[in-house]
Image: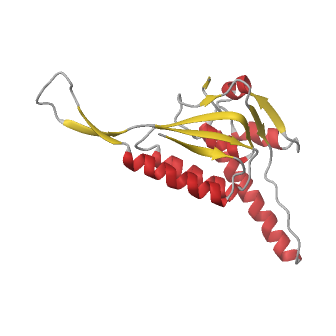
Amino acid sequence: RITGIYGTINEERCVDAIYSMMVLHSSGKTYAPVNPEDPNSEYEESIKPFNFVISTYGGSASDMFSVYDTMRGIKKTCEIHTIGLGKVMSAGVLLLAAGTKGKRKIGANCRVMIHGVISGQHGHLHDVENEFEEAKMTQKSYIKALASETNMTEAYLKKLIQRKTNVYIDAKQAIELGIADELM
C-alpha cells in the first residue's frame, strides 16, 4: 500500500500518483466489528491507510494542486502517511505536509526547500500582466494551503518567500515548522 512521486512534479507523474491514490483508497476497504468482544457486534467499514513517498526538486504548481486536492478528499475517510526522502523542494513541500497529521515522516538527511512561485512569460503586455496576476494568485493559494497544513502562519510564509531566495530547511527544522511530524 504505497505510491508516491519521485522526480519532477509534472502532469505525467501526478496523474499516476492520483490514479494510484484512488486505487489504494477504493481497494483498502475493510469491515471489522465495532466491539470485537461482542459476537453480535455491528460491523463498520474502514479504509486501510497507505504511504505516499515524495522525493522531488519540485515542478508545476497546478499539477501539485491536483494531487493536493485529491489528498484532501481521500483524507476525509483514509489516512495518508507521507514520507519525505532525499529532497522535498518547492511544490513537493505542500504534498509532504498534506499527509495525515501525526503520520508525516521525513528522512534524517532529507533537505526541504521553500521559495516563491516561479513564472516567466513573454508576449503582448496584457498577456504578461494577466500571467503575472495568475502567478500572484497561485502563490497566495500555496501560502494559504501550506499554512493550513503546518505550524507556519501565512505572515511567516510571506516573509520567508519575500527573501527572494531558496530557503533550505533540514529535517529537524521541517518537524519544528510542522511540515513533517517525525524522523524516519
The correct choice, above or below, for 1 with respect to 63 in the image is above
Tell me if 111 is positioned left or right of 165 in this view.
Answer: left
- Tell me where residue 89 appears, x and y as whole percent: 75, 41
Viewer-proximal residue among 107 and 130: 107
Residue that appears at 69% across and 52% down: 9
Residue that appears at 64% across and 59% down: 12
Residue occupying the far left of the picture: 40
Quarter of the image for residue 155 reads top right
Viewer-proximal residue among 94 and 5: 5
- Tell me where residue 39 appears, x and y as whole percent: 12, 27
Viewer-proximal residue among 125 and 170: 170
Quarter of the image for residue 61 reads bottom right
Quarter of the image for residue 6 reads top right
How many numbered callouts? 0
Residue that appears at 75% across and 45% down: 90
The correct choice, above or below, for 75 with respect to 107 in the image is below
- Tell me where residue 74 appears, x and y as whole percent: 46, 47
Viewer-proximal residue among 142 and 104: 104
The correct choice, above or below, for 78 with respect to 128 in the image is above
Residue that appears at 83% across and 69% down: 129
Quadrant, the C terminus: top right
